[in-house]
Amino acid sequence: MIQESPRSSSTESRSLSSWTLLLLLLSVLGGSCAPGIQERCNRWFQRIKADQRQQRWAQLERFVKRVGSKKTSSQGGKCFPAMCPRHTETLLKRLATMLHARALKTQNKAMFHLSERSYRAFMAAYPRSPDCLVMTHQHADLLWYLALQGQKKREQWCLCRRHEILGRGPNWSYIGRRYSRVTRLSRPPKMTRKEYRTRLKQAAMGAVQSLMRADEQGEPQRRPPSTSCPPTSGSQSCLYRKTPIPSTPQRLLKAIRYYLKRDPRTEHRPRMLFNMGHIYWKYNHFRKALALYLLVVREHASAFPRIARTAAFRVVGMLVVQRQYRLVRRYVDQFMRSKELMKNPAFAARMRKHKRSLDRKLAQED
């Protein structure tokens, strides 16, 4: 968690000194709440005004913590959501979005911190709110931005332990799960169907990109016991035995399927199909990988020849490992009949070499 003082720079001092707008926003709690709450809230906000900047920031953090808490206080008083739920929900939503917008302008880490805590407090206190979809999406966008800033500036911008992996940077798997959470929420009553579909597509793409980074990052996870053979074994059938797919690649496969279902005509379709095939290929699920690679070659060879050529090489390699030489020969002939693929001299030379080698092996078998 970031422990940076709010007055560590001139930019942060200017941003923290203009809290008049925020305090006017907080006064919404004193509108039509239960009797006696208006005076308590007004006294509390006056105390925030009288404090110094650093103390005022601590008071605002306490406020967010109290709003997000579902428990009663030690003196027996109720928490804010129980006292005036409708106004507290509106307040917390506006507080999180306003802090998010101001933090993007001022690049204030402490403001990013409080905005993220406000989002989490809202989702914890009001999980069935109609605004939960928008707030969850904005929370995931905030985590994505902070992760990219941390990688760009090579410093810690993550907010707490769940958002980072020690020694390896941001926890992209957690960010991907937050985006995936958006895709499971139903449409709010006041949101149009077009806006709802757009948000689902954006969240699905965010989940795919985050989980792809997590898979490349190699995050620590509980892997099931491997069923592969020991290194001393020389059998090819043993070395290429299926292994269970870990949790992060499984989430990535699920996110890609969901995205392609929501946007089947997307320009990213061939790359998505290739990435799905790559996961199955990586863990020796050759049958599923073969179907996806052949789909890429047949449907997207003209528009994306480079991806199609890589998929064709994978098809040949998987079938050679399985010693299905006749099937390899048939697919090699199909690839050589493709004008888009054979335009590349290196690909054409390798296909001709594969054809000569397969002819020799088939002649020996006969």
Image: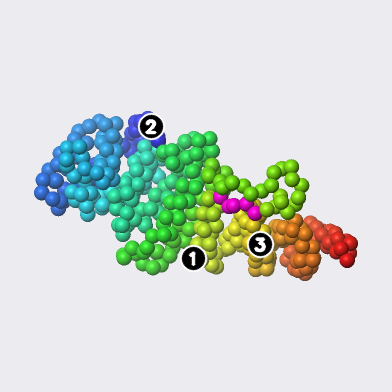
Find residue 290 and report its image quarter: bottom right
Answer with left or right where residue 263 lies relative to residue 305.
Answer: left
Find residue 129 and report its image quarter: bottom left
Instruction: Please check the rendered image and state whether residue 244 is part of the magenta-colored stretch, yes or no.
Output: yes
Answer with left or right where residue 335 lies relative to residue 151.
Answer: right
Are the residues flagged by discs 1 and 3 in contact, CB closer than 8 Å? Answer: no
- Give the mark nearer the N terminus: 3 vs 2: 2
Mark 2 sits on what residue? 3
Task: Name the spot of residue 291 as percent of width and height, x first.
Answer: 65, 65
Q: Quadrant of the C terminus?
A: bottom right
Provide the residue span drawn in magenta. 242-246
Taking the spot 28% from the left edge, 45% from the top edge, the residue there is: 68
In the picture shown, does residue 363 fall above or below 140?
A: below
Mark 3 sits on what residue? 287
Task: Name the spot of residue 356 as percent of width and height, x first.
Answer: 86, 61
Front of the two marks 3 and 2: 3
- Give the mark nearer the N terminus: 1 vs 3: 1
Mark 1 sits on what residue? 262
Amino acid at pointer 1 = Arg
Kindly tell me whether residue 96 is visible in this rendering. no
Viewer-nearest residue: 331 or 340: 331
The CA distance from mark 1 to mark 3 is 25 Å
Amino acid at pointer 3 = Arg
User: Which mark is drawn over residue 7?
Assistant: none
Disc 2 is placed on an element classified as loop
Viewer-nearest residue: 336 or 150: 336
Amino acid at pointer 2 = Gln
Kindly tell me whether residue 166 is visible in this rendering. yes
Taking the spot 39% from the left edge, 38% from the top edge, the residue there is: 109
